[in-house]
Image (cartoon, rainbow, N blue to C red):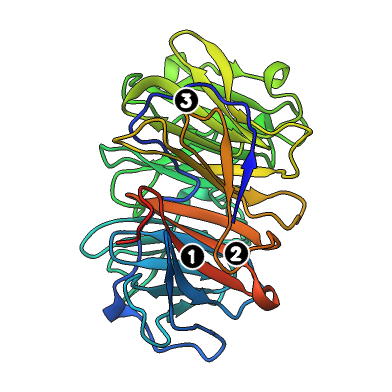
Amino acid sequence: MKTCVALRATFLSVALVSLFSTNQSCTHAQSAKSLNTDLASQKGHTTGRWKDLGTLATDDPVKLSLTENHVYALSGQTLYGRTPGDNEGNAWNEIETFEYELNDIYTVSGSPDTIILTLKDAFETLPLRISHDGGKSWAAYGSEFADQPEKVGLEYEVPKQFFREDSGKLYASLSGLNTVVSTDLGRTWTYALGRQPEGACPGGESRTITLPAHPGVIFKSQDCPLKDSTVASVSTVPTEQKLEKLIDESFLGQKTPKTLAASASLPDTLFVGVDDGIVRYDVKERKSDWLMKASSEQEWSGYLTQIWVDPSQPDHIVVSGYPRDSKLEFLLFESKDNGKTFESLRSPSDPKGLAQSSGSATFGNHLVISAREEENKPRIWLFDLKSNSFN
């Protein structure tokens, strides 16, 4: 089902842009355990650009990740995996169930893949569970995330977001300006900007990204509960570490920056996913504008966390996200006219537009998205971003 949504957007000439709130990878089928008895999956079917990957019998939120050959579904304390091409029977397999409740997933493709899971709370236990062998074994990492490492019964700060440079550097965003970096896929970490003062932004959400055309600088978004939300740049040189605001409350208003994105084809452009829209910032010209923004005429609100632009047809744009305030909304939009108008895309089993999406992830020309549909159980869909047929 398609519903036309008139969203204001400006021209975007870019080959590919990916938002990094969730990076994409998955687990090898041979490392997966037997099917969990609480997991429900139907035989998949394909309808046009949509491929049904079955449902999960869970009441917990589902976080997804995707690679060339595998899909992850993280829910509660359990990580599941499957190959998207397997249509026979119960294709979802339990990879691991952990002692602690998990919060998010970040993965790096490889042979085998690296899987990074964050704990929801980390008291007297390290905040990361990482597998460097595709899910066969797991270890705890993140000793540098301790809030007060000298004390007994310490509580560890859990990273809010990960971002991996083409160079292989892996950044993890903590609260405020605190940013840690790893060059060995999460085995060891150091502070990219040194240990920042505790009062910088206590309890605030933080995101990190770098632009190849601006070496020695990291870009940060901050959602501070007691301060104004900002998007800023900081030099990694210790003697030059001064926060420079790029976008502040005068432009964002009450909107919260939730994710950052960049594209190699636009070396000076920074994309910021916020409440009900995406902001574009030109680092060189120091100018902000809206790529897309909901208005009072639209019946949707939410956080846009993914944007994909067709490498061969830059006027073809797909964006997705998840709803705000638990509203029943499926946030997946497509534009074929450089963002002048967007169509709202619905899954084949949701013609009346009642399903609630809970985030998505992209890899190559495909997007994986979860939607609570029948009996409020999350159904996982694989969507072909590029064409009208699924390969």
The residue at the far top in this view is: 285
- Which residue is depicted at the point 61% across and 54% down? 151
For the residues labelled 1 and 3, the Cα–Cα distance comes to 29 Å
Q: Eyeballing the image, is 391 above or below 149?
A: below
The residue to which callout 2 is attached is 371
Q: Is residue 148 visible?
A: no
Where does residue 351 sit, x and y in percent of width and height? Answer: 63, 63
Name the residue located 27 percent from the left edge and 80 percent from the top edge.
30
Q: Earlier in the sequence, mark 3 or mark 2?
A: 3
Q: Amino acid at mark 3?
A: Leu
The residue drawn where x is 62% and y is 26% is 8
Q: Say the numbered circle drawn on residue 381.
A: 1
Q: Looking at the picture, how far across and down is residue 237, in whole percent?
A: 39, 20
CA gap between label 3 and label 2 equals 29 Å
* Mark closer to the chain start, 2 or 1: 2
- Mark identifier at residue 99: none
Q: Residue 61's x, y, as percent?
A: 63, 65
Judge from the rendering whether residue 301 lies leftward or rightward of residue 17; answer left or right. Answer: right
